[in-house]
Amino acid sequence: MAFDDNPDFRYLWEERLSKDLTNDFADIEASHMASVGNFWVATATQDESTKIVGIIGLQRRSESNGENGIKSLFLTTNPKKKQALEFYAALGYTKGDELMRFWENPQFFEVDKIVKQL
């Protein structure tokens, strides 16, 4: 994901990766493991080899009911990833109507917002 087929937008991914590595990932505990958030890493092991298959950062957006104050979860995914959308639907997530983009200026990389009420 650190590059794009379109060289006009590749710099956006490079800037994002650089920012994440120097800010969020430089101190994961401070960025994601405080009482208002968390950071999870999903791994899969096959043939005695373990790979990271996904990551998620949780951040509290409001004071709500539910365990740890979490009332709903949302994630974003590429709308072209049909298997991912089917997987999330099987877990109880629904696709929202809100169109999201990683960047607004320039408008680039549209993602679907997927929501699950807890």
Image (cartoon, rainbow, N blue to C red):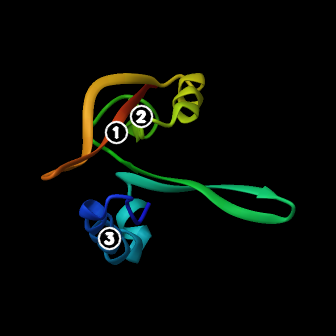
Q: Residues within 10 Å of mark 2 (few under 14, many from 20)?
A: some
Q: Please name the amino acid that badge 2 sits on.
A: Pro
Residue 74: quadrant of the picture: top left
Disc 1 is placed on an element classified as strand
Q: Please name the amino acid that badge 1 sits on.
A: Val
Disc 2 is placed on an element classified as loop
Q: Who's the residue at 35% across and 69% down the image?
A: 17
- Residue that sits furthest to the right in the current view: 47
Q: Which residue is mark 2?
A: 79
Mark 3 and mark 2 in contact? Answer it, CB < 8 Å.
no
Mark 2 and mark 1 in contact? Answer it, CB < 8 Å.
yes
Q: Who's the residue at 78% across and 57% down the image?
A: 45
Q: Which residue is mark 1?
A: 111
Residue 73: image tag = none
**Quadrant of the frame with the N terminus:** bottom left
Q: Which residue is mark 3?
A: 14
Q: Who's the residue at 26% across and 38% down the image?
A: 100
- The disc, 1 or 3, on the residue closer to the chain's N-terminal end is 3
84, above or below 45, in the image: above
